[in-house]
Image (spheres, rainbow, N blue to C red):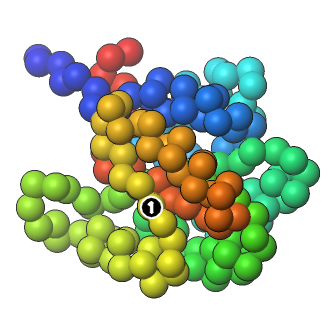
Amino acid sequence: MVQQAALLSPEAMVAEFKKNGVTHIITIPDSETNYLYELMKDQPWLDIISASREGETMAIAMGLAIAGKVPVCLIQNTGMMESGDSIRGMGLDSGLPMVLVVGYRGWTRHGVTPDSAARFTEPFLHAFGLKYFLVESNSDAERISFAFQEAKSTSRPVVVLIGDEYHGFNR
């Protein structure tokens, strides 16, 4: 069996969260984020809050931000689209900086994807006027810091699209 090297390691993500003072991750744990989840739950400086719906992550993050914490919403693109009203009402209208880390389900740079979730993700972001950064590998991880800088300077939500799963091959 040939082991594949991780393109985007959970360690790179967690390092960027720590560098930016993240205190809370609001998420819906799933199989795609399992390796990242396992690493995050072992960090004493980071609290993970599980939500039952993606739209709830915005309200929880807003409350934490008002309390002076630094939350991140960790959701999938399908959940982001379902959360449109929460993004509008709590993200855009609140004027609070917020970073959403969004799994780019169905996306591939290697050709056309039959998954409509990927085809609608960027048009959704454009419709809402959300700036976003694509992260596919460890060398792109610093874009997470760019997202935090953008969110702070504009007092708006900024999205980090994760174009690859959080692999655990190097564990």
Q: Position of residue 71 (x, y in %)?
A: 71, 48
Q: Is residue 124 above or below residue 19?
A: below
Where is the N terminus found, in terms of image quarters?
top left
Q: Position of residue 83 (x, y in %)?
A: 59, 74
Q: Quadrant of residue 113?
A: bottom left
On the rendered structure, is 87 left or right of 12? right
Q: Quadrant of residue 155?
A: bottom right
Where is the C terminus found, in terms of image quarters?
top left
Q: Is residue 63 above or below residue 136?
A: below
Q: Secondary structure at mark 1?
A: strand
Q: Position of residue 73 (x, y in %)?
A: 62, 54
User: Residue shown at 74%/21% (left/top)?
Assistant: 44
On the rendered structure, is 148 left or right of 49? left
User: Residue shown at 56%/46% (left/top)?
Assistant: 29
Residue extending farthest to the right is: 67
Can residue 81 be seen in the rendering of this structure?
Answer: no
Q: Position of residue 47 (x, y in %)?
A: 74, 35
On the rendered structure, is 65 left or right of 167? right
Q: Is residue 39 above or below residue 151?
A: above
Question: Of 139 and 161, which appears nearest the observer?
Answer: 139
User: Residue shown at 11%/18% (left/top)?
Assistant: 2
User: Residue shown at 32%/50% (left/top)?
Assistant: 163
Question: Of 49 and 58, which appears nearest the observer?
Answer: 58
Q: Is residue 137 above or below residue 5?
A: below
Q: Which residue is mark 1?
A: 132
Can residue 162 be seen in the rendering of this structure?
Answer: yes
* Label 1: how many Cα within 10 Å (few below 14, some 14–19, many 20+): many
On the rendered structure, is 125 left or right of 4? right
